[in-house]
Amino acid sequence: MLDKLNPPQRAAVLHAQGPLLVLAGAGSGKTRVIVEKIAHLIGIGRYPAKRIAAITFTNKSAKEMRERVAKRLRAEDAAEVTICTFHALGLKFLQIEHQHVGLKRSFSIFDADDAAAQIKDLLGGSNAKPDDIEDVKNLVSRAKNAGLSPEQAMAAARSSREKNAAMVYALYQARLTAFNAVDFDDLIRLPVQVLEENPDIALAWRERIGYLLVDECQDTNDAQYRLLKQLAGPAGNFTCVGDDDQSIYAWRGANPENLQQMGRDYPALQIIKLEQNYRCSNRVLRAANALIAHNPHEHLKTLWSDQADGERIRVWECRNSEHEAEKVAAEIHFLATSRRIPWSDFCILFRGNFQSRPLEKAMQLVGVPYHLNGGTVFLERQEVKDTLAWLRLIVNPDDDTAFMRAVQSPKRDVGATTLAKLAELASAKDMPMAQAAEAMGALAQLPPRAANSLSKFTDILRALRMDMRQLSSGDLVRRVAKDSGLLSELRNQAKDTGSYERRAGNIEELASWFEGGPRGASAADMAAQLALISRNDKDDGGNQVRMMTLHASKGLEFPYVFIVGCEDGVLPHQVSLDEGNLQEERRLLYVGITRAKVQLWMSYSKLTRKFGEHIRLKPSRFFAELPAAEIQRDGADPVADAAHKQERAKAGLAAIEALFD
Ligand code: ATP
Ligand code: MG
């Protein structure tokens, strides 16, 4: 296998002692180096599989990497390598070391919505302004990503805005602890805290993880970098790969400075650069190189490729986003049918999820099967969240957020007054809501109907907790949906049988996910894993056109790529323009362009509608940074256009003839 790599790639795979950073441009085989290196280290017996951990940026890339590693190794070895995201690794860590941060093993994970609901509540509930909630939430998250505890955040606060946020952070954290819960940011921050404060635990983990590999290193935030440092220890047996030109997650706290910091923290750090791109056609690559050269660089990377020149980048001017969507859908349909290209070879990229609507409509109209990443994601559906709340509450009786959701789904005679009383009692007695409910239902300090309802609820809960031990994870989900009354409520609410079947089907899908987990995984483990599957992360695969944001496309590749909405104010985004973050937007487009293996389209609209008014749009300023020789504007090349038209006509004719065959 090693002889299939180029010399610097091979050097990176063979480098086994001390810290290594592979710093290289898009499509140069960084991820491939990680896969090969895992296989190599295990293959030569340098490390046993269970002492190797590889960190990827998304669950989806972890899955892909696992599949690629599995092809190289014996099944029992492949199953033992840890390949996951930073968050999943943090979860694994806390499941073992939970007692050091005052958590019980059954802790819950709050998703972004749960966290936002708590912060809203702390800021005064419905009186709180959405902007304030958002602001405080971001400040809390930023403090956590910087690895600060509430006390440290308070000490570091300068303005009254920051002081206020630090105060909310402290209250919010106290609640999380009371609920035996953590949020996403804690999955990194808490392990860092444990490792930094307990050298013996750090030593034990360095023993457990002998070798660490990290993909997309340019997008680690400070807390993640500290986790990496703790796990690697002073010897620094790690391989990190990254590309500072593809750092696009600053808004989530990513800090590409960490790449420089790594050099200071590890004086022995070796740096290997890769310069051959194996992914893109030469025209696409030259365009990407020219674009990114407009960002300041210490050392400009010059990527080259021995692939053919390929087609020029087609730039389309469209009337509006509907027109644009129709053109894209028609082109994909034409190429797929006339040249027998599978749907899954196409990908449409956009700056924001809102841009997917006209595309979806056009795809449906033209009859192109598509898959939208991060749309109304399965896990965000109401019935799925309700079922998960029940599961969380069964596993972790302290989880008050899950309690509040479960007790109200399905609807029962437990109103706001009862819940307020319950909360009061719970906090006076310092007990979780579920326990207070048992006490209160029994004590009947409530109107009989509410008391009755509440005690029925706690009875169901208790029975389900007993069932948990006997049932498989999947059957537990089914039992919960049935016994909780969720299914019958769905049936009663459904306007038609179709909608009932769809929603009940989602619960069944959840059950089969639980079944599909690793052998021996409990429902508790599965619920925790599910919480980690983030919005952009689930990919159903299959032979469908992919549609996703530019951010979600990092690390992926497709033969045919369309980038839509290339307008000033959209790409580059207005917020970034206002804040002077043009460079980050340029990197984002660089990521998008370098996803294309064979051909690339870029399109923009002339008009958009806002509040009923037509507004003129300007093409993205980035077009001016692409070499004219690599671009073909619509209508600019009559000969090529005519050939294209002729080919289309022929394909149309063939389709008609096929009808009469
Ligand atoms: P990105 O920066 O987008 O994450 P990357 O540097 O991780 O890209 P890979 O995804 O590893 O690049 O590789 C890009 C493509 O080039 C893949 O299809 C990969 O299989 C192929 N490739 C990488 N190295 C080689 C090689 N030595 N020979 C042939 N193909 C290669
Ligand atoms: Mg990669």
Image (cartoon, grey):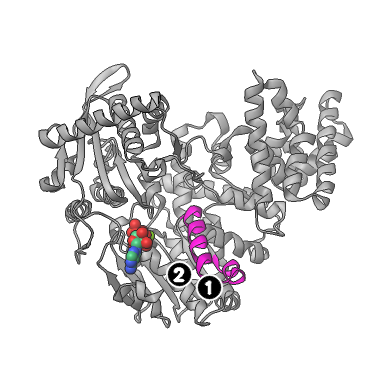
At 28% from the left and 29% from the top, the residue drawn is 327
Res 21 → quadrant? bottom left
State the image quarter where residue 492 is shown: top right
Q: Quadrant of residue 330?
A: top left
Residue 256 visible, this orientation: no
Which residue occupies the foreground of this view, 279 or 394?
A: 279
Q: Considering the image in quadrants, where does the C terminus appear? A: top left
Ligand 1 image-quadrant field? bottom left
Across and down, in percent, residue 165 comes to 48, 46
Residue found at x 84% / y 48%: 466
Question: How far across and down, in percent of the image, does residue 415 sit?
Answer: 73, 26
Residue 31 within the magenta-colored segment of the rendering: no
Coordinates of residue 149 in the picture (x, y in percent): 52, 58
* Quadrant where the N terminus is found in the figure: bottom left
79 in magenta: yes
In the foreground, 542 or 181: 542
Whether residue 96 is situated above or below residue 438 in the rendered picture: below
| Span highlighted in magenta in the image | 58-82
Give the numbered dot on residue 630. Answer: none
Q: Earlier in the sequence, mark 1 or mark 2?
A: 1
The yes-or-no answer for disc 1 within 8 Å of ligand 1 is no
Q: Is residue 528 left or right of residue 47?
A: right
Residue topped by disc 2: 213
Q: Amino acid at mark 1?
A: Ile
**Whether label 1 touches label 2, CB < 8 Å:** yes
Residue under label 1, please give it: 52
Amino acid carrying label 2: it is Leu
Is residue 630 rendered to the left or right of residue 67? left
- Secondary structure mostly seen in the magenta stretch: helix
